[in-house]
Image (spheres, rainbow, N blue to C red):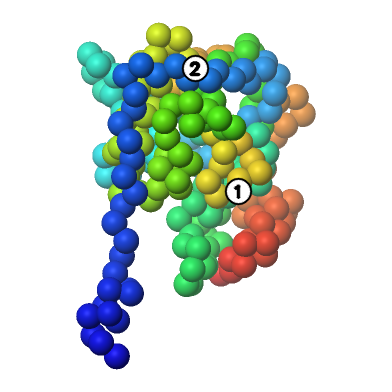
Amino acid sequence: MNPALHSSSHRVPPPIRVPPFPSDADPLIGVWPAGRGIVRVYDALYSPRGFWTGTPTRPSRFHPFTPTGAPGPVPVLYGSDRLAGAISETVFHDVPVRGTKHVPRATLRRKLAITLTATRDLRLADLTGYGLRRLGATRAEIIDSDPRSYADTARWAHGLHAHREHLDGIQLVSRQYDTALALILFRDRVQETELDIAPNAIPMPLALGAGFDNVQDLADQADITIT
């Protein structure tokens, strides 16, 4: 076998090129109605309504970003429209598609799931449907790109946050579980006091009981082993 061909077949592909956020952006705007559930998985050391600033050493797809003139990054809150989406985007977020697919059960010890509701309608940049096409981008570029592109996709959050519509956040298709929606709320637009724990909802531990049953069911579907 030609060594050059063999090495090239195992070469890591370059990061996906993310287009710049358009200066004349006119995003689709979706409404997350007051009372609609926002399911989130969070660490028991923090508030179920808590927003997270993030750090440059632990970036996510849409943060951290710092608005022009602001003293620091905007804290954000991630959620989903269903439990499967929230678990997939947190517990299984870093599990590779190929190779060893394990999640230590110990990582679930402090994780809880809760359903929140907003006390008012939330106006979100809608990146579902034709939302990305309208802005001159594709799902592969914005949603499916890997962490090497996070600095560029965070600039999209910066651009949407700065838009004249003063949007409350972003909604998009979950990358990990694509029949669920994911949403990101901006702390300087949505106050913690505008988020309530849904009626009859209580924090559900993911390490045991019904919470673990949900994690295990999703792991089975994804061929992930809980160790």
User: Camera-side residue: 193 or 78?
Assistant: 78
Q: Where 130 sits versus 193, above or below?
A: below
Question: Residue 58 appears at what percent x and percent y?
Answer: 32, 44
Question: Residue 196 appears at what percent x and percent y?
Answer: 63, 20
Q: Please tell me which of labels 1 and 2 falls first in the chain.
A: 2
Q: Is residue 90 left or right of residue 146?
A: right
Question: Residue 48 appears at what percent x and percent y?
Answer: 56, 31
Q: CA distance from mark 1 to mark 2?
A: 23 Å
Q: Which mark is residue 17?
A: none
Figure quadrant of residue 186: top left
Q: Is residue 6 left or right of residue 60?
A: left
Q: Quadrant of the N terminus?
A: bottom left
Three-letter amino acid code at the position of disc 2: Asp
Task: State the residue position of label 2.
Answer: 168
Q: Which mark is residue 177?
A: 1
- Residue 208 in view (yes/no): no
Residue furthest to the bottom: 1
